[in-house]
Amino acid sequence: MKLVDNKNTTWRKISKVILIVNSVEISYRNSFSIDLNCNFENISRGRCNLKISKKLKKEIDSLYVHTDQPLMDVNIFYSSEKIERLINVLGMNKDNKRKIRAVLETSDNLMVNNNGYLYVKDKLELSIKSILWNIPII
């Protein structure tokens, strides 16, 4: 994420990161996983790689913000059944011109300025409390 000068800037807290899905890839080895390439709706610059994998033990859904590049990595862990259901629903959107959105509610607030730039002092990792999928089908 772009480092922003803290002087003369008004910051506001956001507890949700809204992603616009650009592409979806499905992988299969012993179980399905989904890789989504996304842009932000409520943050001005950067991109996000969201990976949905099978939950094996006590993995925690997390969001990682890089400081050396305009990138977030998100890891979500679902049961195999939930991944397969999501794949089926995502498939309903394949010919739709409207984009899929994902709303991530984070465990702590992020700071953005009036231009939507994210404040990043150091690399940051947050847990994700919930994720809401908005998948247009008509």
Image: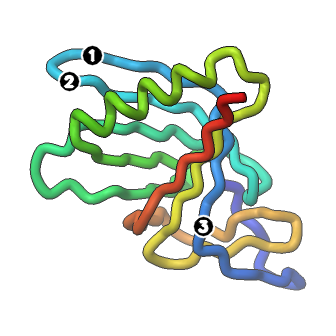
Query: How many marks overall?
Result: 3
Residue 111's image quarter? Answer: bottom right
Q: Position of residue 16 (x, y in %)?
A: 60, 67
Q: Secondary structure at mark 1?
A: strand
Q: What's the residue at 20%, 54% (across, down)?
A: 59
For marks 3 and 2 on the same chain, the one whose residue lies earlier in the sequence: 3
Q: Quadrant location of the C terminus? A: top right
Residue displayed at 44% across by 75% down: 107
- Residue 136: image x %, image y %? 67, 35
Q: Which residue carries the number 1 mark?
A: 28
Q: Residue at x 58, y 56 (%)?
A: 103
Q: Name the kind of residue labelled 2 in the image.
A: Ser
Given contact means CB atoms under 8 Å apart, are the residues at marks 2 and 1 in contact? yes
* Neighbourhood count class around disc 2 (C-alpha, 10 Å): few under 14, some 14–19, many 20 upward: few
Q: Is residue 92 left or right of residue 8?
A: left
The residue singled out by tag 3 in the image is: 16
Q: What label sits on residue 31 in the rendered view? A: 2
